[in-house]
Each structure stands twice: as structure tokens, then as C-alpha cells.
Amino acid sequence: MQAKLVCAVVVFFAAGHAQQEDSGAVTDPDLAFITQFVTANARIEGFAGAGCALLEGITAVHVNPALPNAYNKAKKTRHFIVHTGYGRDSLFDENTVPGGISCYLGEPGTIGLLFRYLQRDDHQQVHEGVFNYSGRMFDKSIDQGAVDFGINLRYERIEWETFDHAPLYKYAYARDSSTAPFSIDTLAVSDRVERGKTRGSRLMFDLGFVQKGVAERLDFGMTFHDLLGYSWLRERPYIKNEIGDSVRVDTLNEYLYYTDSLYYAREYKKRESWCHKKYKRMTVGIAYHPGIMQNKVQLSIPADVGFVGLFDRDTKTRFSLRVGVEAQFLKHYMLRFGYGRAPRVLFPGDLDGDSNPNTNIFTGGGGVRIQPFAADIFIGKQSWGVGIGVAL
């Protein structure tokens, strides 16, 4: 019994050791984050992703699920708004296609549906559906603006081909007596695999709040991303081990020498779990709207601060910053710019230790608003896209 326990412990160590071999560049992103930093709203993308307090429609619900109702209340929109668009970004460099519709119900609030198709290549893609509800939480008071809240129920269907599979090895474990520790020698490569695949689904829940007029010309927003979540995944390959025939034992049948070959099982393995605390995020944002040139030009200045790891004691809290500025002139036309010091995409291990996944993000864009139509475009170093909306 003791021999089996010792053997199991060493095999577990060997499996971990095998995955650290061949520490080349990682290309497979952390699948828990692949949709997190890609918004469906072209205007917000023009601000490098800043927009937690920027009143927008159904395509902005990833940034803050409370925005659609606050937007409809402020703009006094018609009952239905339809949005669509197209673009590419640094991760999904083939297609990002959003499409959504929202229905403004008046006092009961706003409901909306959003679909996104995100594609890296033929074998790396995500289908996402979002149900959004947003409504009035507190009405406007004498010195404070109204507060709206919103929720997202997001369903993601993932099909992702993986490439970062280190070679596995055959190990020899030897010791002089049953009380001595094992010495470990690497004998040879035991298995290699070039490609794998992850298929599965995730169900996630977001919660957001926005207050228009928290101060003069100033709006405030707060979002809790992935507050609750559950995933069903099937992955291949996965690591198994096989004890070799060259086994020596002592008189008490304790292992003195054995070989262990790790190999990749090519079939799928199911894995279900709740969303880990380290994946829960929070964003706090403001949007300031001053006028210049005797109010002939209206500015919008959004700024968001993001927090990753805030809800997990074992994960270092990491901060990100996204800011932008937009000038609206001649009532209908807009130019905007954005800067972010934030992640474009997270890879496995980016939230471990003291690593900093933030990078510089520069974007720009423009827009046109001629009722009942709206159109926006954005462009960045590794991304571009367009968005179109119409009120019915």
C-alpha cells in the first residue's frame, strides 16, 4: 500500500515536470478569457475598450450590462434597436461578427439579445449568445442622477484546436531502501502530439450599474464580470502514465526501482467546474462630457480601471487602464481616439506569480449619427471593425 502511495506521488510530480519541459513560446490563450477583452461595440473599441459609463446599446453589454436601458432613457429611443457589425482583432483575426436586438419596454426596462461569432481559423472559434436585461434602480433626485442596473446571462460554445503540448518522457525512479527518497532520471521521449482540441460550453453571469449625472456632466459605471459561471469541457489529449516492466522490490514488496512512461491519451476527457475566483473581474469607469468652442463641439472622455484577481487571495490583483476622447461636431459626426494599458489576451500562467500581461493599446475611429441610423468604425494596430445600428 505504501509503495502504491509513493508511486502515485512521484508520478504526479513527473506529470507536472513533463508539462514544464520544452518551455517555448506559448500560443494557446487561456480559454477562460478568450472573449473577455473583445467588445461587440465599435464605438467603445475606438476608445481602446473604455466605456463602462458610456451610454450605448445592446452591443456594449460586455462592458456594462446596465447601459442599454440608460441609453434608451437618455435618448428617448424607439422600441426596437438592431445592431450588427464586422471586424477582426489580435486573437480572432479571421472574423468577429456581432448581431443584436434590444426592445425598450418603458418603465419595465430593456431586454436584448446579442449573438457573436468569433473565429481565429477553421478550428478555433466561439459562438456566443447573450440575454440582457437592464432597468431603472433609483430615479433621479434633486442632486443625483438616476441609477440603472443590468444583468447578462452569457452562453459560449467553444471549439478550440490546441498546439502547446510538450513532449512526454520516460522516467526511471531508483532508491537504495524503502526509507530513502527516489532519484529520478529521464530516459527518453515517450510520446509526442502536435495538436489537440477543446470543445465545450460555458454559462456566465455579469452584473452592472450605471449612474447618469453622478456630478455635472459626469457619469459613473461599475461592472462585475463572470460573477458566477459554470463550464462543461471535453479535452484531448490528456496525460496518463504506464508503469514499466523493469520493477525491483525489497523483501517487504516496497519499490526500489521502476520506470514510468507518460503518454497522451487521444480520446476526450470530460471536465466540469465552477468558474475559478481568479477569473472574476471588476471594472469601474467614468465618462465626462464637457463642451468646448461655445458648446459647438461636445466631448466625451471615458476612463475605465479594470481589476483582475481581486476576488482571489491566492492571485495577485492586476490593474488595467483604458481611456479615450471623442469630439462630436456638426451634431452628427464624431472622431475618437483611445489608449489602453491592458491585456489584449491572457495566456495560461499570466495570472500566476508577478507577471504583468498589460500591453500598450492605441486605437482610433469615427462615427455618424443621423436618426434613425448610427454607424461607427475603429482601427488599431492589430484590430479594426465597423458597427451599424438602426432604430425601428
Image (cartoon, rainbow, N blue to C red):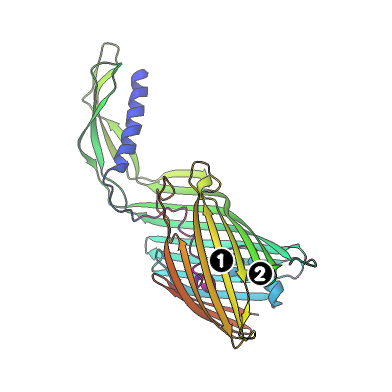
**Is the residue marked by circle 2 packed among few (<14), some (14-19), or many (20+) residues within 10 Å?**
some
Q: Can you say whether 278 is above or below 362 in the image?
A: above
Q: Is residue 47 magenta?
A: yes
Magenta segment boundaries in residue numbering: 28-54
Residue 65 vs 249, above or below: the answer is below
Residue 365 percent coordinates (x, y): 48, 78
**Could you tell me which secondary element the residue under label 1 belongs to?**
strand
For the residue labelled by badge 2, is the local secondary structure a helix, a strand or a loop?
A: strand
Q: Which residue is mark 1?
A: 303
Report if residue 40 is visible in the image. no
Amino acid type of the residue tagged 1 in the rendering: Ala
Q: Main secondary structure of the magenta part?
A: loop
Quarter of the view holding residue 143? bottom right
Asked if residue 142 is positioned above or below residue 234 in the image, the reply reads below
| Lower sequence index among marks 2 and 1 | 2
Q: Which mark is residue 218?
A: 2
Residue nearer the viewer, 60 or 364: 364
